Amino acid sequence: MTEAAAPSPADVARAMLTFDPTTPEYRANPHAAYRQARELGAVVRSPLGLWVVTHYDECASVLRNAAFGWGDSAPDEDTTTTTRFTTNPDGTQVRPFIFLDPPDHTRLRKLVNKAFTPARVRTLLEQTESLVADLLAKARAEAGDGPIDLMSTIARPVPALVLGTLLGVADEDVARFQSLCADIGRGLDLAVFLTPEQIARRDSGRHELIAYFGELAEKRRVEPRADLVSELVSVEEAGDKLTMAELCVTCTLLLSAGYVTTENLIGNGMLALLRNPEQLDWLRANPDRLDDAIEELLRYDGPTQLVGRVALEDTELGGQPIAKGETVLLMLGAANHDPAAYENADELDLSRSGRRNLGFGGGIHFCIGAPLARMVTNVVVGELVKHDLRLVPDAVRAGESITIRGVAELPVTVRDR
């Protein structure tokens, strides 16, 4: 008897999500697929047994509801989960706090929040402004009259350098860590969408960053500096402190997640503006509305498309009974285009106000790096739109990740206005 062929990633994807996110058409524009998924219902059980949630209200409910979290399941590499554990080089496993439920999540987040404050983010504003102007001038000088790739010249190096300053990473190490963060970010996809090599590079990148931050933390313990690692070494709450393993995993999370999120928010946002010139003109005429514009760009084409949760108890969602231990997949990209939540949801409208988008999640697991990502994106977009930017026809290349939507290459010509 001939052995049946293993299902392809596309087959598994359709059975998991009710649509195929592996096609070039989806990567270019996922919203036709999201529209069809929403029409199936707010909460739909996929053939693989996962609950796929595509409507805004139900996604927001899960993010706020204590009946959903991460659970205590052992780490796995099956087709339905991303890795929620970080394996240290010594073989021990630690969960980053964003993958923990209370009370562990509460304890760790409280400690990190004491060190990673909005005031600390504000201290990076002036440096970020100078950095963006310098990198853009350098890229233009090197390109002459030719195009520049906004991703490699601006969208990637700016968040990498700003995060390096925040954490105390040596300047000479930033380029290496930029590559490691890209490998870790690519590895956030569901396992079925990753090759063995991508999984190995993700894990190797985590190990290298954890080891680096372990050495850096020991140095800062002896000789503190004005950086976040020094603050995390000393931060204390009612006598409680971060263990070395917790500190290293937290720094690895802040660097890798912060880099991937900000890079792709900048890239997706600039692409959206360049494809909607009337909105770009509106922003230039209303620079005081830049904060609102960044929120709309986050809603319209934010990086994080998909997050998972586990039912921690028997519960109900959108009229469907969800049993304890079952997985729900929140399609945040679909929820942010839900016509029941937003008028003309598929249109970019920088003057939009009202309902908050889900681009940074919600509830107790709301993205801790959101203020930094917003600040950096605000500075980059604010500087770039001062110039005459034109897309190079047919040269934009979409990223490969399903979970983190992004642009691989964004070639533009830049002229003074």
Image: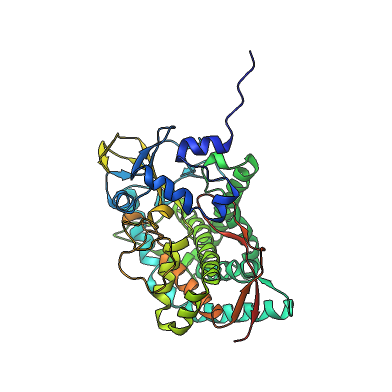
Residue in the image at 55% along x and 53% along y: 185
Observer-nearest of 253 and 386: 386
Q: Is residue 251 left or right of residue 108?
A: right
Q: Let me know if residue 303 appears in the view.
A: yes
Residue 245 in picture, x, y percent from top left: 47, 51
Q: Quadrant of residue 219?
A: bottom right
Residue 176 to residue 350: above or below? above
Residue 397 in picture, x, y percent from top left: 64, 59
Residue in the image at 29% along x and 59% along y: 238
Q: Is residue 77 left or right of residue 175?
A: left
- Given the current orientation, which residue lies at the most extreme bottom position? 417
The colour mode here is: rainbow
Residue 167 in picture, x, y percent from top left: 51, 66
- State the quadrant of the C terminus: bottom right
- Given the current orientation, which residue lies at the most extreme top position? 1
Residue in the image at 34% along x and 42% along y: 43
Residue 110 in picture, x, y percent from top left: 33, 59
Observer-nearest of 286 and 148: 286
Q: Let me know if residue 401 appears in the view.
A: no
Q: Is residue 137 left or right of residue 80?
A: right
